[in-house]
Amino acid sequence: MKKVQINYSQLLFLYAYLRLINLSLDRNRWTTWDELQSYFKNIMAPSKVAQYLISSFHLPKTDFKNFNFIPEEKSLFNRLKPKN
């Protein structure tokens, strides 16, 4: 595994961004769909943050269109499948 050194301002940005996403997920419980869409238009897209991380830390490029954020063994579909 490649070691990556991150400076304080990058760390602060990532913390703030992840905190914003966490609060956004909490917010979706009590707002309408239109309000939530309007809210997300005003924040940076996760794909841009991913591109920033890839370019800043020279990480391998990933095709995020085909990227599965839920590991296969933990997906809801696989949990509901009968065991053979």
Image (cartoon, grey):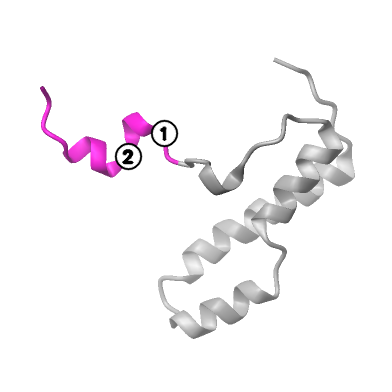
Q: Where is residue 40 in the image (x, y as percent from the top left)?
A: 61, 72
Element at badge 2?
loop
Position of residue 50 in the picture relative to residue 78 (left or right): right
Element at badge 1?
loop
Stretch of the chain drawn in magenta: 70-84
Q: Position of residue 9 (x, y in %)?
A: 88, 46
Q: Quadrant of residue 6?
A: top right
| Marks 2 and 1, how far apart at CA | 6 Å
**Position of 10 relative to 60 (above/below):** below
Q: Which amino acid does label 1 sit on?
A: Pro
Circle 2 sits on which residue? 75
**Position of 54 relative to 16 (above/below):** above
> Who's the residue at 50% across and 62% down the image?
25
> Who's the residue at 44% across and 83% down the image?
32
Q: In which quarter of the image is the N terminus?
A: top right
Within 10 Å of disc 1 (Cα), the crowding (few <14, some 14-19, many 20+) is: few
Circle 1 sits on which residue? 71
> Who's the residue at 52% across and 43% down the image?
66
In this orientation, which residue lies closer to the viewer: 63 or 78?
63
Q: Do the residues labelled 2 and 1 touch (CB within 8 Å)?
A: yes
